[in-house]
Image (cartoon, rainbow, N blue to C red):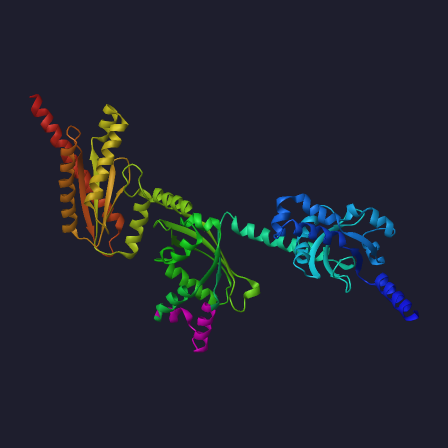
């Protein structure tokens, strides 16, 4: 008797002083409810509970709390046992019902112990995430009238996990919905290949790549694309990531080889963060001018296993720049080179040749009269026709320029006088065809040429070509005047 009493006191002391929340509960009501349902033919408890949510509530109300320890009172902010028991509806509520399904299934299947995560609330209303461990005590297996339950407060852990998941989702959303194309790649094999080259004693990597161009191709093939975002699919015209990854050889080709070689050289020199402009291709074959930013993540600087690339489509900007450059060197009306280009090219030829250098000066006769009598639109039409004739007649490296209102100049590097004369004849022949195509709107021109050899001042060549052209123009007007007088006599 004395030993039994001592044992009883020991248990009470251990129960009450345990540094974890302990509950002694009576599950006999739940056992009776289960027996009743089995007698009714229930064999699938989960489906049975889903058919009527009220059945789950009946299960939770069948539990009876017999006793809790001091740690439990402190955890749930209860003054005493009776205060907690009278307010259990505040402790077990809300999403707690869903969390007890697993323990109900364990007991239904005959398990006398179970472990699960649940949600309780203290009497101040604070949510508690708890790890529940329960055991039907020996001797009570048939009635479930004594069940020892321990609760471990894991709120901080759950909240930390939730915050981590939110942080990961936030980072994922930033990646997935970024307005620029993002690629996550693995360059670890590339690093291994480059390390092997170093180990062979190679120091001049640029020369090595020139001698072994296949190394660049090998490195391109060894890059592993880990992930891309939605903007990448949109930019390259891919329906999904699988299609994009199958088509990498269509995206990275042509000019990309040289760009990637420069990227490898920078990596060889230790530049783990890079930016450059490259050319890629959409899956439809369209050219994409790209501003690429490349960064090996600091955490993977030793093996290059994680690389982030951002690609911004600058095709529209490149087109605008090309058009502005075109406007800077071309005459908009005739599509020929303009005076600025003519001056710049003439200076370049005077320094570098090739010689001999020939020039053809051309002036349209009567354009002012056309502008005065029929309007500038008619005059512009004739200028456009002149541009068409010269564009057709003049082949590179020669070039035709509009240097004034009705003045044109043809630069003929590496061409002697015979070549200049031949081109004049070609221009006149094409002009005659053009006049036949536009009857009633005949274009007349005066032309003069000059040729100079190395050491000749280009200004002197220009002046002689102009003088020859003006002499031709004077003869044309004199002939026209004689014809006019003959017709009036």
Q: Is residue 41 found left or right of 352 in the rendered image?
A: right
* Residue 404 falls within the magenta-colored stretch: no
In the current view of this chain or complex, which residue is farthest to the bottom? 200
Q: Nearer the viewer, residue 64 or 15?
A: 64
Residue stretch rendered in magenta on the structure: 189-210
Q: Nearer the viewer, residue 426 or 226?
A: 226
Position of the N terminus, as image quadrant, is bottom right
Quick check: 420 above or below 224? above
Q: Nearer the viewer, residue 33 or 451?
A: 33
Quick check: 6 above or below 489? below
Q: Position of residue 132 (x, y in %)?
A: 72, 58
In the current view of this chain or complex, which residue is farthest to the right? 2
Which residue is at 20% across, 43% downward?
A: 392
Which residue is at 27% across, 38% downward?
A: 334
Q: Position of residue 28 (x, y in %)?
A: 76, 54
Residue 209, picture quadrant: bottom left
* Residue 196 falls within the magenta-colored stretch: yes
Q: Position of residue 126 (x, y in %)?
A: 76, 48
Q: Is residue 225 found left or right of 44 in the rendered image?
A: left
In the current view of this chain or complex, which residue is farthest to the top? 488
Quick check: 270 above or below 86? below
Quick check: 381 above or below 283? above
Q: Is residue 406 found left or right of 216 in the rendered image?
A: left
Res. 345 in view: yes
Q: Position of residue 61 (x, y in %)?
A: 75, 47
């Amino acid at each position: 008797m004395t030993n039994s009493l001592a044992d009883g006191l020991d248990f009470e002391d251990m129960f009450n002083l345990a540094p974890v929340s302990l509950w002694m509960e009576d599950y006999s009501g739940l056992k009776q409810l289960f027996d009743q349902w089995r007698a009714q033919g229930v064999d699938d408890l989960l489906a049975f509970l889903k058919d009527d949510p009220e059945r789950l509530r009946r299960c939770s109300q069948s539990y009876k709390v017999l006793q809790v320890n001091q740690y439990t009172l402190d955890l749930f902010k209860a003054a005493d046992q009776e205060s907690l028991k009278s307010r259990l509806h505040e402790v077990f509520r809300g999403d707690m019902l869903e969390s007890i399904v697993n323990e109900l299934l364990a007991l239904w299947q005959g398990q006398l112990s179970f472990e699960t995560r649940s949600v309780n609330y203290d009497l101040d209303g604070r949510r508690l995430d708890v790890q529940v461990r329960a055991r039907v005590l020996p001797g009570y297996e048939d009635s479930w009238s004594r069940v020892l339950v321990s609760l471990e407060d894991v709120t901080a852990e759950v909240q930390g996990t939730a915050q981590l998941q939110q942080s990961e989702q936030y980072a994922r959303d930033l990646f997935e919905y970024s307005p620029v194309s993002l690629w996550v790649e693995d360059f670890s094999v590339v690093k291994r290949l480059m390390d092997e080259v170093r180990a062979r004693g190679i120091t001049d990597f640029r020369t090595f790549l020139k001698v072994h161009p296949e190394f660049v191709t090998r490195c391109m093939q060894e890059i592993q694309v880990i992930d891309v975002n939605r903007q990448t699919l949109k930019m390259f015209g891919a329906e999904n990531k699988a299609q994009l990854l199958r088509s990498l050889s269509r995206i990275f080709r042509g000019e990309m080889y040289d760009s990637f070689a420069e990227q490898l050289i920078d990596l060889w020199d230790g530049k783990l963060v890079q930016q450059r402009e490259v050319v890629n291709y959409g899956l439809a074959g369209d050219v994409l001018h790209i501003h690429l930013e490349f960064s090996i993540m600091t955490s993977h600087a030793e093996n290059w296993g994680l690389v982030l690339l951002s690609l911004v489509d600058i095709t529209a900007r490149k087109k605008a720049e090309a058009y502005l450059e075109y406007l800077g060197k071309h005459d908009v009306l005739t599509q020929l080179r303009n005076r600025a280009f003519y001056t710049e090219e003439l200076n370049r030829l005077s320094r570098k040749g090739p010689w001999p250098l020939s020039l053809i000066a051309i002036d349209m006769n009567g354009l002012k009269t056309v502008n005065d009598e029929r309007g500038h639109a008619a005059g512009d039409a004739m200028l456009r026709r002149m541009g068409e004739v010269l564009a057709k007649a003049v082949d590179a490296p020669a070039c035709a320029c509009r240097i004034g209102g009705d003045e044109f100049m043809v630069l003929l590097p590496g061409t002697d006088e015979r070549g200049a004369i031949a081109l004049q004849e070609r221009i006149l022949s094409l002009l005659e065809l053009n006049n036949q195509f536009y009857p009633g709107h005949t274009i007349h021109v005066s032309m003069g040429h000059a040729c100079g050899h190395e050491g000749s001042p280009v200004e002197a060549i220009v002046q002689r070509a102009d003088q020859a052209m003006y002499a031709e123009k004077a003869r044309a007007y004199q002939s026209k005047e004689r014809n006019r007088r003959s017709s009036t006599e």
